[in-house]
Image (cartoon, rainbow, N blue to C red):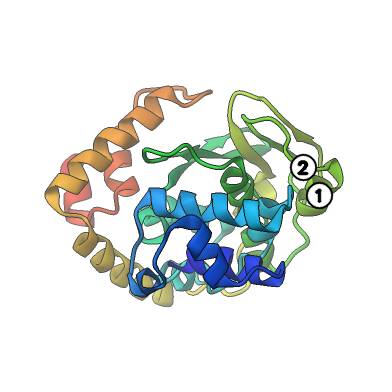
């Protein structure tokens, strides 16, 4: 629900009261007390926010607001990770604790690596603002976790441009391309692998154990089977994917325990 609260807060900053926004989305205010929302609820909220604000750069602005409290329990794990690459791997592993709306893939290169986002929508097609918010959030996250001014080498979207170019330059600080094969952010390996200032292996281990427990409680056997099928589909359809997905990778992506992960190998 932290992502929902981020959208609500951005709408309020734009002068749209949450009561009006929820009414436009057809969502009862009482549902804000729920721990999780269906994917289509979140899509309805996004559509309503874009309609009410009439802001073509709304998604970029939402993503730019990402900070330490944006990822629930996973935030603590990310802040204690050894590197930005390790933090992104943690996001991949515990993605369901943040949102059911998509998955990340890392495509490593010699000097830079792509962080690719694969949306996973429900019955309703995602708003393109949701995709823009996610990539803007990747860059904002990299900035707060490293404490540096992060400028990707390149950013690209599979969708068409929906806002003025100035908004993209402000959000990413680099060239942005549209209607490409995938949506992703290209980051230097030196940035991804540099030690983080707040790295703490002991804290990271404790936070990882807590996140794993939360993820296991969230994932009933049927849910795990569905998540596995969806993950495999993402991997097999992903552009630039060099080989078939392995069981150990699936175990890590779904947040299985070390014991189950070793069995998968």
Q: Is residue 17 left or right of residue 256?
A: right
Q: Contact (CB < 8 A) between labels 2 and 1? A: yes
Label disc, if present, on residue 163 of the rendered structure: 2
Residue 149: percent from left, percent from top: 78, 61
In this picture, is 215 found above or below 190?
Answer: below
| Of the pair 102 and 128, the residue shown nearer to us | 128
Q: Residues within 10 Å of mark 1 (few under 14, many from 20)?
A: some
| Of the pair 205 and 43, the residue shown nearer to us | 43
Residue at image coords 65%, 45%: 189
Residue at image coords 37%, 73%: 207
Distance CA(mark 2)–CA(mark 1): 7 Å
Residue 257: percent from left, percent from top: 22, 57
Residue 137's image quarter? Answer: bottom right
Work out which quarter of the rendered image holds the N terminus and state it. Answer: bottom left
Q: Is residue 200 left or right of residue 28?
A: right
Residue 61: percent from left, percent from top: 70, 58
| Of the pair 263 and 104, the residue shown nearer to us | 104
The residue wearing badge 1 is 167
What secondary structure is marked by label 2? Answer: loop
């Amino acid at each position: 629900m932290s992502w929902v609260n981020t959208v609500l807060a951005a709408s309020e900053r734009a002068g749209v009261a949450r009561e009006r926004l929820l009414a436009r989305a057809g969502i009862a205010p009482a549902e804000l007390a729920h721990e999780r929302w269906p994917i289509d609820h979140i899509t309805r909220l996004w559509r309503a926010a874009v309609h009410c604000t009439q802001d073509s750069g709304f998604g970029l602005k939402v993503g730019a607001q990402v900070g330490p409290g944006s990822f629930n329990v996973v935030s603590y794990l990310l802040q204690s990770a050894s590197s930005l690459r390790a933090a992104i791997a943690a996001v991949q592993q515990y993605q369901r604790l943040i949102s059911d709306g998509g998955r990340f893939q890392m495509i490593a290169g010699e000097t830079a690596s792509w962080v690719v986002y694969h949306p996973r929508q429900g019955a309703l097609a995602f708003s393109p603002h949701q995709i823009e918010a996610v990539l803007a959030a990747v860059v904002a996250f990299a900035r707060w976790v490293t404490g540096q001014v992060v400028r990707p080498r390149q950013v690209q979207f599979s969708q068409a441009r929906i806002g003025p170019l100035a908004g993209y330059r402000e959000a990413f600080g680099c060239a942005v391309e549209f209607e490409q094969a995938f949506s992703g952010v290209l980051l230097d390996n030196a940035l991804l692998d540099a030690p983080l200032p707040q790295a703490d292996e002991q804290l990271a281990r404790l936070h990882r154990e807590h996140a794993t427990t939360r993820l296991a409680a969230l994932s009933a056997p049927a849910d795990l089977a569905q998540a596995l099928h969806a993950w495999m589909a993402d991997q097999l359809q992903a552009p630039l994917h060099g080989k078939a997905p392995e069981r150990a990778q699936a175990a890590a992506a779904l947040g299985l325990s070390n014991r189950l992960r070793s069995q998968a190998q």
